Amino acid sequence: MTKESLRIVYMGTPDFAVESLRCLVEGGYNVVGVVTGPDKAVGRHGSVLQPTPVKQYAVEHGLPVLQPEKLKDEAFIEQLRSLQADLQIVVAFRMLPEVVWSMPPLGTFNLHASLLPQYRGAAPINWAVINGDTETGVTTFFLKHEIDTGAVIRQVRVPISDTDCVGDVHDRLMVLGGRVVCETVDAIIDGSATATPQEEMMTEELRPAPKIFKDTCRIDWNRPAKQVYDFIRGLSPYPAAWTTLVAPDGMETVLKIYVAEKLERSSASKPCGTVETDGKSYLYIYTADGALSIRSLQLAGKKRMGVEDFLRGSRLSEGYNIK
């Protein structure tokens, strides 16, 4: 079997999944169909349907597209079966029922943006940065019943620098993932692919990567400065860490913070959440053991801006605080 004869069905939805599909198409692999999410209603009245990034790419390159509402729908199962895939590849898609992932004779493998078995779950890149990890990577593994627990085929590591935000790491892993997906297919074709049970790879306590909600993103200024710093960059640029700015008159405003810098200073005389500023060029917020200099932020209803522009328009004084 060759890459031209191996029949591949690809499953994915967001931008992260487009790169792997692009690598397969441009690499000459035989992608016979693409499965992605339904078009989303957007606009003021939901009157415009927006296709997923994966669908946009697939349509541009003449690939058949399936967009099931439910993955157990009999009509979808029959359509999928008619594609006669030898192998299915999943990148940033929904959890598949067994009737889907067990269909092709060579199985179904998934690309996950972490060093499994660490960070099983929906937001592995965010949590690796939030936790201050200095290394992450991508893993391909065969699907089985329990999510993100299948045997590992291939794993590649990359460093995380102390100044990386989650957007930087996302883009790095997206590009790496495309390469690793193709390498995994090649190994399956030539018979060199091995599958290592994740149980054999567990050398430390497992850290989860649950889905991130709005409440997850609220900053706790009672934590050490390094933890708050990692939390901010682990949510930047999306969905963004946030806090509540309280004016001297008690008025509260939601403030998103995208970029911060660590300061070497003691906060012994200033409570956590205290704001320090000259109203022109700097904005410091105190934590449990120091302070952070806020460099990029966004007020509710406004555009993201640098701290100097923010201070110029806000007339912020030291009478403000954070909670």
Image (tube, grey):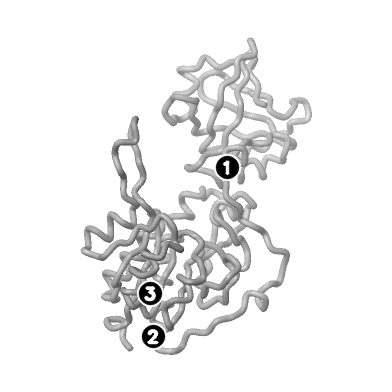
Q: Earlier in the sequence, mark 1 or mark 2?
A: 2
Check residue 213 in the rendering and tell me which mark sits there, or answer none: 1
Q: Residue 145, how many percent across, how many down? A: 58, 70
Q: Where is residue 131 in the image (x, y as percent from the top left)?
A: 64, 52
As helix, strand or loop, the secondary structure at mark 2 comes to helix
Secondary structure beneath label 3? helix
Nearest-to-viewer mark from 3 and 2:
2
Query: Between marks 3 and 2, how big is the CA–CA gap?
Result: 11 Å
Name the amino acid, label 1.
Answer: Phe
Q: What residue type is labelled 2?
A: Ile
Relative to 305, say whether 137 is above or below.
Answer: below
Q: Is mark 1 on a helix, strand or loop?
A: loop
- The reply, left or right, for residue 215 in relation to residue 30 is right
Left or right side of 54 for 156: right
Badge 1: residue crowd in 10 Å (few <14, some 14–19, many ≥20): few
- Say which amino acid is labelled 3: Cys
- Label disc, if present, on residue 182 of the rendered structure: 3
Mark 2, residues whose alpha carbon is within 10 Å: few (<14), some, or many (≥20)? some
Q: Distance between the residues labelled 3 and 1?
A: 33 Å
State the image coordinates of residue 116 (x, y, percent, origin top left).
Answer: 59, 68
Q: Residue 189 carries which label?
A: 2
